[in-house]
Image (cartoon, rainbow, N blue to C red):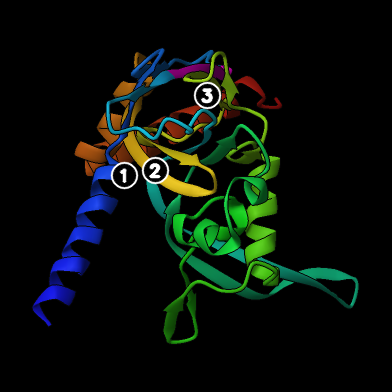
Amino acid sequence: MIARALAAALLILLAVTSAQAERLIVSVSNHRVTVTPNYSGEELVLFGSVEKDASTPADRTAYDLVVTVKGPAADMVTRRKERTFGIWINTDYRQFLQVPSYLALFANRPFDKITSGEIARRQQLGLNNVLLTQRVGTDYADVVPNDVFRSAFIRLRTQRGLYREDASAVTFLTPTLFRTGIPLPAEVPIGTYRVEIKLFAGGAFVTKTETAFEIVKVGFEQFIATAAHQHGLAYGLATALMALMTGWVASIVFRRD
């Protein structure tokens, strides 16, 4: 029993040592994106390198990389419409709980070429493998990738540029230097974005690292957003007063004698 326990401990130690044979050094071109009234979107650049050490296997010369970018989590709803008596009405819906408001997955080649399906599901590689928790009746769970609500949710977010998947977005400039772009659409949500970079070699997961950037509003938009959150009552009264004043001015300008 003791010998077996020692052998198991040695295997764990070897696995940990192997997993730490490389490390990732990464950075983002801009860690703070400012949104102004004329903001129309932009693209950040993630770049980095694979740092080897003395314990790196000599025959390990090729790597695969998967970059996952997640925006602030939020609850969202996908509705199903059906035509009844010539009118489109909502007949069913599904609530998605604390899912990323922005989600991008980038790699240097197709995900099914990088690793096995089991590891891809465990590491959440690709939109089909990302966990998107839903409220299904009284239960909370992720569902199969071809679920109609899940598919519709991803399709609608993709059309708006808020969900994306690109298996050729990561470029290895050298065997250990890499880069990728992170496109941000005009309607990108405000908040902190977490970037997770995972390294694979020969189909096996090697190591990972994380970085982050934030998107903030500045100028008049930030003033309005802050007022709405911190002084809700005053903001509501001011908005109602402005609406009344606008209506009163319009009634004078367009009054018929």
Residue to which mark 1 is pinned: 19
Image quadrant for the N terminus? bottom left
Q: Which class describes the residues within 10 Å of circle 1: few (<14), some (14-19), or many (20+)?
A: some
Look at the image and say whether residue 213 sits in the magenta stretch.
no
Residue 124 vertical position relative to residue 96 in the rendered view, above or below: above
Highlighted magenta segment, given as a residue range: 40-47
Residue 135: % across, % down: 47, 75
Q: Is residue 8 visible?
A: yes
Which residue type carries mark 3? Val
Q: Is residue 157 left or right of residue 98?
A: right
Q: Is residue 169 left or right of residue 5?
A: right
Residue 123: % across, % down: 45, 55
Marks 1 & 2, CB-CB < 8 Å contact: yes
Q: Secondary structure at mark 3?
A: helix
Residue to which mark 2 is pinned: 206
Q: Which mark is residue 249?
A: 3
Marks 2 and 3, the one that precedes in the sequence: 2
Q: Residue at x 69, y 60 (%)?
A: 152
